[in-house]
């Protein structure tokens, strides 16, 4: 047993170049994620934002006292003002730059992880996405990479993370029994109904039906079979890396999915090794990396890595079985898993397990007389039918993204929409910055309403004549959202 554990923690010289490149990739994506949040976090979670985080903290403290400090592990217990939120986001960008240029790497990674966990919790449902937890677990494991080098256990943990993200996404597509996934028609809808289509989505939507059907089979292949290559000998791992990287590039060519596809590509690096990475780096850079002193794994870092690995395996497997099998766990175990998940590690993944077959879009309108209504413009989600669907990769506009979830769910999760309308009535500058334009620059409108439209891509023939990218049909006022006076 002792010999086996020593082998798990032995540094692998075959991944020295890979590790260096991986850390640069982590720095780049962390920096993108922090910068993306910096320009919108105050409108989402600031005191005048849609879901003020200080209210969440105050309520938690009133309910649980000092226990709330570890129930919500965040630096914003000290200060949850706009300034604190922005300093945390821009501070993460600075730390990402330090990591990229090989300065204070351990401190930078620990600092970014702490800051992103804090922002992850502050953002509430606006940061409740799988790429946020994927980044957090990647960043958490990367800390051990600079503390002890690429040992076998750490590489296994990166493999396990990539496997979960890919395989579980495919598994839940079948497990949920969505008709479009089962009858291979998903891609007949996906490009048009996904959260934020871009210009490439329009072109792929008009591919022949046989190609779209074949594309669904390709998704099953890449998500249900290819992930198992990760744990097979080197030729299979290389194949898994190449197929997965190609798939991520294909997704980027057809969809706005922020930084997640870049992050998956970075995780694929540990399916390769220095023999391959050496061919991608200039000779002088290879020499520089190879002259760097390999970090020595301290006893404390080995212990923490071992404990972390156990927690991640147990948490992810337990939550997966709880979601898919008729099993129950003791309360203490469920509470422990919840705490682990709040730290952004040990999650399960399920990307697009259910496909929407129609696209409904909400438009927020204001009026001062109840007769003439003017829309608030969103930056990235569909609006004017002649507006080319924009590319926002690698940025994620969190409000635009969340608006997509409302029409299909209607009354279920629209509580935050009422809070958004309240902020618009107040003329909150932080919230208004989330929009492309404000039709009421002088003062907020007397009335607000939300109307729904059904959207479809134009055909090539229609676009050739009109120049429009979309057709839309008015559906009416969105349920339960009525005009309100301030």
Image (tube, helix red, strand yellow):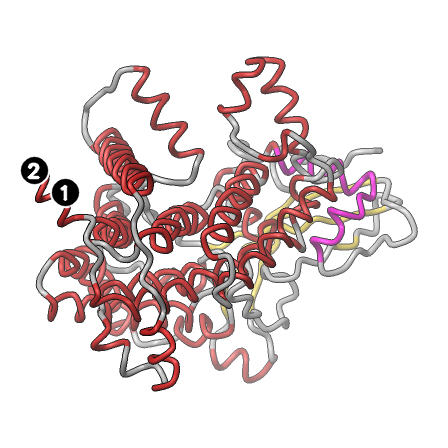
Residue 292 point in image, percent of width and height: 36, 69
Name the residue: 19% across, 53% down. Answer: 10
Q: Which mark is residue 1?
A: 2
Majority secondary structure of magenta residues: helix
- Residue range of the region highlighted in magenta in the rendering: 416-435
The answer to whether 228 is drawn above or below residue 119 in the figure is below
Q: According to the image, label 1 marks what residue?
A: 5
Callout 2–callout 1 Cβ contact below 8 Å: yes
Q: Which mark is residue 422?
A: none
How would you rate the neighbour count of disc 1 (Cα within 10 Å): few for under 14, some for 14-19, many for 20 or more?
few
Callout 2 secondary element: loop
Q: Is residue 212 left or right of residue 342?
A: left
Residue 394's place in the image compared with 431, above or below, is: below
Q: Is residue 12 left or right of residue 435?
A: left
Measured in 3D between alpha carbons, the distance from the residue under mark 2 to the one under mark 1, in whole angstroms, is 6 Å
**Quarter location, residue 193:** bottom left
Is 75 in front, or is 379? 75
- Asked if residue 149 lies left or right of residue 120, the reply is left
Give the percent coordinates (x, y) of residue 454: 54, 55
The residue sitting at 34% across, 65% down in the picture is: 293
Give the percent coordinates (x, y) of residue 302.
28, 42
């Amino acid at each position: 047993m002792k010999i086996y554990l020593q082998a798990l923690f032995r540094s692998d010289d075959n991944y020295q170049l890979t590790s260096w490149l991986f850390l640069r990739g982590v720095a780049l994506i962390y920096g993108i994620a922090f910068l993306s949040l910096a320009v919108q976090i105050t409108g989402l979670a600031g005191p005048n934002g849609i879901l003020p985080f200080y209210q969440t903290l105050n309520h938690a403290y009133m309910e649980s006292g000092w226990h709330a400090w570890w129930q919500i592990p965040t630096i914003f217990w000290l200060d949850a003002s706009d300034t604190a939120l922005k300093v945390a986001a821009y501070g993460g960008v600075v730390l990402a730059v330090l990591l990229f240029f090989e300065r204070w790497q351990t401190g930078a990674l620990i600092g970014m992880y702490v800051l992103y966990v804090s922002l992850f919790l502050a953002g509430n449902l606006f940061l409740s996405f799988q790429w946020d937890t994927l980044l957090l677990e990647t960043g958490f494991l990367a800390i051990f990479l600079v503390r002890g080098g690429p040992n076998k256990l750490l590489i296994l943990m990166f493999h396990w993370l990539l496997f979960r993200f890919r395989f579980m996404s495919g598994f839940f597509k079948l497990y949920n029994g969505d008709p479009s996934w089962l009858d291979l028609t998903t891609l007949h809808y996906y490009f048009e109904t996904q959260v934020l289509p871009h210009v490439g989505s329009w072109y792929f939507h008009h591919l022949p039906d046989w190609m779209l059907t074949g594309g669904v089979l390709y998704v099953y292949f890449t998500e249900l079979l290819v992930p198992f290559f990760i744990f097979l000998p080197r030729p299979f791992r290389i194949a898994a890396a190449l197929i997965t990287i190609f798939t991520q590039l294909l997704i980027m060519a057809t969809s706005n999915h922020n930084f997640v596809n870049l992050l998956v590509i970075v995780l694929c690096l540990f399916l390769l090794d220095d023999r391959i990475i050496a061919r991608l780096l200039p000779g002088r850079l290879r020499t520089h990396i190879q002259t760097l002193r390999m970090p020595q794994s301290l006893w404390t870092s080995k212990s923490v890595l071992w404990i972390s690995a156990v927690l991640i395996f147990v948490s992810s497997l337990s939550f997966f079985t709880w979601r898919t099998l008729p099993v129950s766990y003791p309360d203490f175990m469920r509470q422990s898993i919840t705490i682990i998940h709040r730290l952004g590690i040990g999650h399960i993944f399920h990307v697009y397990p259910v496909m929407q077959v129609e696209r409904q879009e909400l438009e927020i309108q204001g009026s001062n007389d109840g007769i003439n209504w003017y829309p608030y413009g969103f930056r990235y989600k569909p609006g004017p039918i002649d507006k080319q669907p924009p590319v926002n990769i690698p940025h994620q506009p969190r409000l635009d993204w969340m608006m997509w979830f409302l029409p299909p769910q209607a009354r279920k999760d629209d509580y935050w929409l009422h809070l958004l309308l309240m902020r618009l009535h107040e003329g909150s500058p932080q919230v208004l910055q989330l929009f492309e334009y404000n039709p009421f620059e002088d003062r907020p409108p007397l009335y607000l309403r939300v109307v729904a439209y059904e959207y479809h891509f134009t055909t090539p023939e229609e676009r050739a004549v009109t120049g429009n990218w979309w057709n839309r049909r008015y559906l009416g006022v969105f349920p339960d959202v009525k005009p309100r006076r301030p």
